[in-house]
Image (cartoon, rainbow, N blue to C red):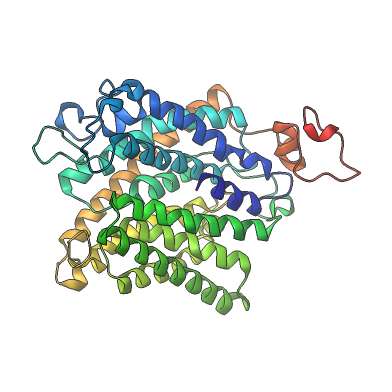
């Protein structure tokens, strides 16, 4: 999903900004190193003080202790740690979409490492770390305290990344909102990236069942139909509002539906998944225009797609959840009342407030110390040549690139 996201983002930026989406690879690689050093401990170590806020950083330093895990376990704990590693990687990569083409690469890497440590790892503990049945391990307060449902990361991944994107205070791009130099340069690349993300999402969601069986099968089906409904809903809204359904709209419609079904995929029936996907596709097609109304510059609509989609999916569990699904909880429409909706709302607000607040403070500090934005003139001519000394596409008129293999 990390390379798929880089392709998806890369197609949506200008031709002199596409290579800058190595931000996805750079951020993910740094997070993987931090995960091995201490990230897994913070996320899945025994909760410090039993409060459910953060895992014990001293429990699995370097993850060497996992090598002696119980061979009789249903899945190796090392495999679980590797699986969860990529949740951390892709969440960090998602945030890059808000800063595409205008953030210093060095500042991005510094931000990504600190952000994962103080924002993602703690929230992952809240949402993904469950208390053990015998009480020997205390998990996160959202997962094991209030027992909010988030099957595969609507709060910890998508809302978290979306709130961080909103808080990443870079200011408006040069020429915003009419920016000819930042228009999508490759719609086929967007479609390829979206398609690969859809495939990866099956592993993202169904893999969170942690076994091959009925639960994973239900999740797989729900993920497929929700994404399809989202694509059709976005295309329909686009057709009604603008007179044509576009390839960009089709690719864009997939993603918010996948985002929305991520927390709900184990809680709803296929009909519920269709409803959630369609609602997310239609609403997010409108939400991406909020940046023009509210005046914030979110380069690749991380807020309108991932933040809004994550909120939709997390809250709609309180309406569409059925106890026949793997999570075994009923929402309002299935006789469960409003209790689950209230629980989902608490988890939503907590993640949004923490992620936005801490990210905003972090961004302000880093901007003061190292500066986050590239120079305006470099932004206009393209960050690829300014920051990476290379271009994705060369013509006879282009200057020779410094440090690029294409010089030969």
Q: Quadrant of residue 116?
A: top left
**What residue is at 52 percent from the left and 60 percent from the top?**
288
**What residue is at 21 percent from the left and 58 percent from the top?**
327
Q: Position of residue 344 (x, y in %)?
A: 24, 55
Q: Quadrant of residue 70?
A: top left
Quadrant of the drawing holding the C terminus: top right
283 or 6, which lies in front? 6
Q: Is residue 202 left or right of residue 347?
A: right
380 or 220, which lies in front? 220
**What residue is at 22 percent from the left and 60 percent from the top?**
326
Residue furthest left in the image? 134
305 or 172, which lies in front? 305
Check the image and report above or below for 188 versus 56. below
Q: Position of residue 189 (x, y in %)?
A: 65, 56
176 or 161, which lies in front? 161
Residue furthest front in the image? 71
Q: Position of residue 104 (x, y in %)?
A: 62, 32
**What residue is at 39 percent from the left and 63 percent from the top?**
223
Check the image and report above or below for 84 versus 275. above
Q: Position of residue 158 (x, y in %)?
A: 41, 49
Check the image and report above or below for 125 versus 320. above
Number of labelled discs?
A: 0
């Amino acid at each position: 999903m990390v390379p798929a996201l880089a392709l998806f983002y890369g197609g949506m930026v200008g031709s002199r900004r596409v290579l800058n989406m190595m931000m996805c690879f750079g951020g993910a690689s740094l997070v993987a190193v931090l995960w091995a050093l201490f990230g897994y401990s913070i996320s899945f170590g025994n909760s410090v003080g039993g409060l459910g806020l953060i895992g014990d950083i001293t429990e699995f330093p370097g993850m060497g202790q996992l090598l002696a895990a119980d061979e009789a376990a249903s899945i190796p704990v090392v495999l679980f740690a590797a699986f969860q590693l990529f949740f951390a990687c892709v969440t960090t990569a998602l945030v890059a979409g808000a800063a595409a083409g205008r953030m210093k690469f060095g500042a991005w890497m510094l931000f990504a490492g600190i952000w994962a440590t103080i924002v993602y790892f703690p929230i992952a503990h809240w949402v993904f770390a469950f208390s053990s049945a015998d009480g020997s391990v205390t998990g996160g307060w959202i997962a094991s305290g209030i027992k909010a449902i988030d099957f595969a990361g609507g709060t910890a991944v998508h809302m978290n990344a979306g709130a961080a994107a909103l808080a990443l205070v870079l200011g408006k791009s040069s020429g915003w909102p009419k920016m000819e130099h930042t228009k999508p340069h490759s719609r086929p690349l967007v479609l390829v990236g979206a398609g690969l993300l859809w495939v990866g999402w099956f592993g993202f969601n169904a893999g969170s069942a942690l076994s091959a069986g009925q639960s994973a099968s239900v999740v797989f089906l729900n993920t497929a139909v929700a994404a399809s409904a989202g694509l059709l809903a976005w295309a329909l809204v686009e057709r009604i509002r603008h007179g044509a359904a576009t390839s960009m709209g089709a690719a864009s419609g997939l993603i918010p539906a996948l985002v929305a079904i991520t927390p709900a995929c184990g809680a709803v029936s296929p009909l519920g998944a269709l409803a959630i996907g369609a609602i997310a596709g239609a609403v997010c097609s409108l939400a991406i225009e909020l940046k023009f109304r509210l005046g914030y510059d979110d380069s690749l609509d991380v807020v309108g797609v991932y933040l809004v989609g994550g909120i939709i999916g997390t809250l709609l569990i309180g309406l569409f959840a059925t106890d026949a699904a793997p999570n075994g909880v009923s929402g309002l429409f299935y006789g469960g009342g409003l209790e689950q909706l209230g629980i989902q709302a608490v988890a939503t607000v907590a993640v949004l407030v923490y992620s936005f607040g801490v990210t905003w403070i972090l961004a302000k500090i880093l901007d003061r110390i190292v500066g986050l934005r590239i120079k305006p003139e470099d932004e206009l001519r393209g960050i690829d040549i300014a920051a990476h000394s290379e271009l994705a596409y060369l013509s006879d008129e282009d200057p020779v690139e410094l440090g690029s293999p294409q010089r030969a």
